[in-house]
Amino acid sequence: MVADLDRVTALFADGYAAWVWLTTPRPSLDGAEPLALLARGEVERVAEAALGDRQGDFA
């Protein structure tokens, strides 16, 4: 199980939107897949990127 996954998924309107975001390489994470970073324990970094992407920030 991935720690703090619910902290990130709560930032999205639905599970599908969260899954797409989590499994797509993100420019805001230097091209990394958010789910892979969560598996390595980078919860803060992923949560901040999710919030930024949701707000329309650009990397």
Image (tube, grey):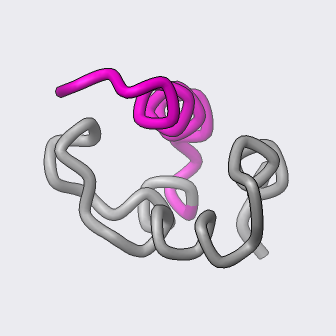
Would you say 6 lies left or right of 34 here?
Answer: right
Question: Residue 49: x, y in percent?
Answer: 44, 33
- Residue 47 is covered by the magenta coloring: yes
Q: Is residue 26 left or right of residue 14?
A: left
In the picture, measured across the screen, residue 25 lies left or right of residue 53, that is: left
Q: How many numbered circles are shown?
A: 0
Q: Position of residue 32 (x, y in %)?
A: 25, 57
**Picture coordinates of residue 12, whole percent (x, y):** 69, 51
Task: Give the residues drawn in magenta, as a range.
Answer: 39-59
Of 51 and 55, nearer the camera is 55
Q: Is 37 situated above or below 36?
A: above
Is residue 59 shown above or below 25? above
Q: Residue at the location (42% across, 74% down)?
A: 23
Report the predominant secondary structure element of the magenta stretch: helix
Residue 25 is drawn in which quadrant?
A: bottom left
Q: Quadrant of residue 27?
A: top left
Across and down, in percent, residue 48 comes to 52, 25
Residue at the (18%, 27%) spot, across then down = 59
Lateral position of residue 28 relative to residue 1, left or right = left
- Residue 23 or residue 4, whichever sits in front: 23
Q: Quadrant of the N terminus?
A: bottom right
Q: Nearer the viewer, residue 14 or 48?
A: 14
| Image vertical order of residue 28 relative to residue 1, above or below | above
What residue is drawn where x is 81% and y is 47%? Answer: 10
Q: Is residue 13 magenta?
A: no
